[in-house]
Amino acid sequence: MLLGSMLAGMAFANSPVAAVHALAYPIGEIFDVGYGLSIALVLPYVLEFNRPAAEALYAELSDVIQPGYRRQSDAADAAAFIAEIEAICRDCGVPGSLSAVGIGEGDLSKLAKGAMKHAERLLVNNPRELDDDQARAIYAKALAGASRP
Protein backbone atom coordinates (compact mmCIF):
# COMPACT_ATOMS: atom_id res chain seq x y z
CA MET A 1 0.00 0.00 0.00
CA LEU A 2 2.85 2.35 0.87
CA LEU A 3 4.54 1.69 -2.47
CA GLY A 4 1.28 2.29 -4.33
CA SER A 5 0.75 5.57 -2.49
CA MET A 6 4.27 6.69 -3.29
CA LEU A 7 3.91 5.84 -6.99
CA ALA A 8 0.56 7.62 -7.15
CA GLY A 9 2.12 10.68 -5.55
CA MET A 10 5.00 10.64 -8.02
CA ALA A 11 2.57 10.42 -10.94
CA PHE A 12 0.33 13.14 -9.50
CA ALA A 13 3.29 15.48 -9.01
CA ASN A 14 4.19 15.17 -12.69
CA SER A 15 0.76 15.58 -14.22
CA PRO A 16 -1.18 18.75 -14.98
CA VAL A 17 -4.30 17.88 -12.96
CA ALA A 18 -4.13 21.07 -10.95
CA ALA A 19 -7.39 22.81 -11.87
CA VAL A 20 -9.38 19.59 -11.67
CA HIS A 21 -8.39 19.19 -8.04
CA ALA A 22 -8.71 22.88 -7.19
CA LEU A 23 -12.27 22.93 -8.54
CA ALA A 24 -13.19 19.62 -6.91
CA TYR A 25 -12.15 20.56 -3.38
CA PRO A 26 -14.89 23.17 -2.76
CA ILE A 27 -17.59 20.81 -4.07
CA GLY A 28 -16.68 18.36 -1.34
CA GLU A 29 -15.99 20.98 1.31
CA ILE A 30 -19.23 22.91 0.83
CA PHE A 31 -21.64 20.22 -0.38
CA ASP A 32 -20.19 17.10 1.26
CA VAL A 33 -19.76 15.36 -2.10
CA GLY A 34 -17.15 12.58 -2.18
CA TYR A 35 -13.80 13.57 -3.61
CA GLY A 36 -13.81 11.09 -6.49
CA LEU A 37 -17.28 12.18 -7.55
CA SER A 38 -16.29 15.85 -7.23
CA ILE A 39 -13.36 15.18 -9.58
CA ALA A 40 -15.56 13.35 -12.09
CA LEU A 41 -18.16 16.13 -12.07
CA VAL A 42 -15.67 18.77 -13.23
CA LEU A 43 -13.04 16.73 -15.11
CA PRO A 44 -14.48 16.95 -18.65
CA TYR A 45 -15.06 20.70 -18.29
CA VAL A 46 -11.55 21.36 -16.98
CA LEU A 47 -10.06 19.22 -19.76
CA GLU A 48 -11.95 21.32 -22.28
CA PHE A 49 -10.79 24.54 -20.61
CA ASN A 50 -7.16 23.37 -20.64
CA ARG A 51 -7.36 21.96 -24.15
CA PRO A 52 -5.83 24.98 -25.95
CA ALA A 53 -2.68 24.61 -23.85
CA ALA A 54 -2.64 20.82 -23.58
CA GLU A 55 -4.09 19.64 -26.90
CA ALA A 56 -1.00 17.71 -28.00
CA LEU A 57 -0.79 15.98 -24.61
CA TYR A 58 -4.46 15.01 -24.72
CA ALA A 59 -4.04 13.81 -28.32
CA GLU A 60 -1.30 11.41 -27.20
CA LEU A 61 -3.78 9.79 -24.82
CA SER A 62 -6.58 9.31 -27.34
CA ASP A 63 -5.48 5.87 -28.52
CA VAL A 64 -4.37 4.84 -25.02
CA ILE A 65 -7.81 5.39 -23.54
CA GLN A 66 -9.54 4.00 -26.66
CA PRO A 67 -7.73 0.91 -27.94
CA GLY A 68 -8.09 0.71 -31.69
CA TYR A 69 -8.58 4.46 -32.09
CA ARG A 70 -6.87 5.74 -35.21
CA ARG A 71 -4.98 8.96 -34.68
CA GLN A 72 -6.00 11.87 -36.89
CA SER A 73 -4.94 15.37 -35.87
CA ASP A 74 -4.13 16.79 -32.46
CA ALA A 75 -7.44 18.67 -32.46
CA ALA A 76 -9.52 15.61 -33.38
CA ASP A 77 -7.56 13.31 -31.08
CA ALA A 78 -7.86 15.66 -28.10
CA ALA A 79 -11.61 15.96 -28.72
CA ALA A 80 -11.87 12.16 -28.89
CA PHE A 81 -9.95 11.85 -25.62
CA ILE A 82 -12.27 14.28 -23.82
CA ALA A 83 -15.35 12.59 -25.32
CA GLU A 84 -14.11 9.22 -24.07
CA ILE A 85 -13.56 10.62 -20.57
CA GLU A 86 -17.16 11.88 -20.67
CA ALA A 87 -18.37 8.45 -21.81
CA ILE A 88 -16.50 6.73 -19.00
CA CYS A 89 -18.04 9.12 -16.48
CA ARG A 90 -21.50 8.44 -17.92
CA ASP A 91 -20.94 4.67 -17.95
CA CYS A 92 -19.86 4.81 -14.30
CA GLY A 93 -23.06 6.60 -13.33
CA VAL A 94 -21.56 10.01 -12.67
CA PRO A 95 -24.41 12.56 -12.64
CA GLY A 96 -24.58 14.76 -15.72
CA SER A 97 -24.47 18.06 -13.87
CA LEU A 98 -23.64 19.75 -10.59
CA SER A 99 -27.35 20.30 -9.97
CA ALA A 100 -27.69 16.55 -9.39
CA VAL A 101 -25.65 16.93 -6.20
CA GLY A 102 -27.58 19.95 -4.92
CA ILE A 103 -25.54 22.78 -6.40
CA GLY A 104 -27.39 25.76 -7.84
CA GLU A 105 -26.59 28.90 -9.81
CA GLY A 106 -26.31 30.90 -6.59
CA ASP A 107 -23.47 28.67 -5.40
CA LEU A 108 -21.11 29.22 -8.33
CA SER A 109 -19.30 32.31 -7.01
CA LYS A 110 -18.75 30.62 -3.64
CA LEU A 111 -17.33 27.57 -5.42
CA ALA A 112 -15.04 29.73 -7.58
CA LYS A 113 -13.71 31.55 -4.52
CA GLY A 114 -13.15 28.20 -2.84
CA ALA A 115 -11.18 26.96 -5.85
CA MET A 116 -9.00 30.06 -5.79
CA LYS A 117 -7.98 29.23 -2.21
CA HIS A 118 -5.96 26.40 -3.75
CA ALA A 119 -4.34 28.62 -6.38
CA GLU A 120 -0.90 28.82 -4.80
CA ARG A 121 -0.65 25.07 -4.26
CA LEU A 122 -2.44 23.66 -7.29
CA LEU A 123 -3.19 26.20 -9.98
CA VAL A 124 0.45 27.14 -10.49
CA ASN A 125 0.82 23.75 -12.19
CA ASN A 126 -2.20 24.08 -14.47
CA PRO A 127 -1.47 24.26 -18.22
CA ARG A 128 -3.51 27.49 -18.41
CA GLU A 129 -3.91 30.31 -15.96
CA LEU A 130 -7.25 30.19 -14.21
CA ASP A 131 -8.92 33.10 -12.46
CA ASP A 132 -12.14 33.53 -10.48
CA ASP A 133 -14.26 34.30 -13.54
CA GLN A 134 -12.92 31.34 -15.51
CA ALA A 135 -13.46 28.99 -12.56
CA ARG A 136 -17.03 30.25 -12.27
CA ALA A 137 -17.55 29.70 -16.01
CA ILE A 138 -16.31 26.10 -15.71
CA TYR A 139 -18.68 25.51 -12.80
CA ALA A 140 -21.53 27.08 -14.82
CA LYS A 141 -20.92 24.62 -17.67
CA ALA A 142 -20.80 21.74 -15.20
CA LEU A 143 -24.01 22.99 -13.58
CA ALA A 144 -25.80 23.07 -16.91
CA GLY A 145 -24.28 19.79 -18.06
CA ALA A 146 -23.26 21.74 -21.15
CA SER A 147 -21.84 19.52 -23.82
CA ARG A 148 -18.47 20.27 -25.26
CA PRO A 149 -17.28 20.08 -28.86
Image (cartoon, grey):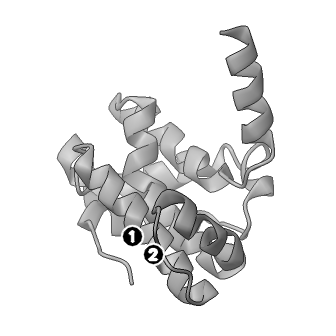
The image shows residue 146 at horizontal and vertical percentages of 29, 73
Against 36, residue 129 (above or below) is below
Amino acid type, mark 1: Ala
Name the residue beneath numbered marker 1: 83
Q: In front: 2, or 30?
A: 2
Q: In front: 80, or 71?
A: 71
Can residue 29 be seen in the rendering of this structure? yes
- The mark found on residue 80 in the picture is 2
Residue ID at (42%, 59%) = 85
Q: Is residue 101 left or right of residue 15?
A: left
Against 27, residue 111 (above or below) is below
Against 55, residue 113 (above or below) is above
Residue 71 is drawn in which quadrant?
bottom right
The extreme top residue here reads 1
Count of numbered badges drawn on the protein: 2
Q: In this view, does 90 lie to the left or right of 58?
A: left
The extreme front residue here reads 68
Q: What element carries label 2?
A: helix
Q: Quadrant of the C terminus?
A: bottom left
Residue ID at (37%, 38%) = 37
Can residue 140 be seen in the rendering of this structure? no
Disc 1 to disc 2: CB gap under 8 Å: yes
- The mark found on residue 127 in the picture is none
Amino acid type, mark 2: Ala
Q: In front: 52, or 91?
A: 91
Disc 1 and disc 2: Cα gap in Å? 5 Å
Q: Is mark 1 on a helix, strand or loop?
A: helix
- For mark 2, does the 10 Å Cα neighbourhood hold few (<14), some (14 to 19), or many (20 or more) residues? many
Residue 44 is drawn in which quadrant?
bottom left
Against 34, residue 145 (above or below) is below
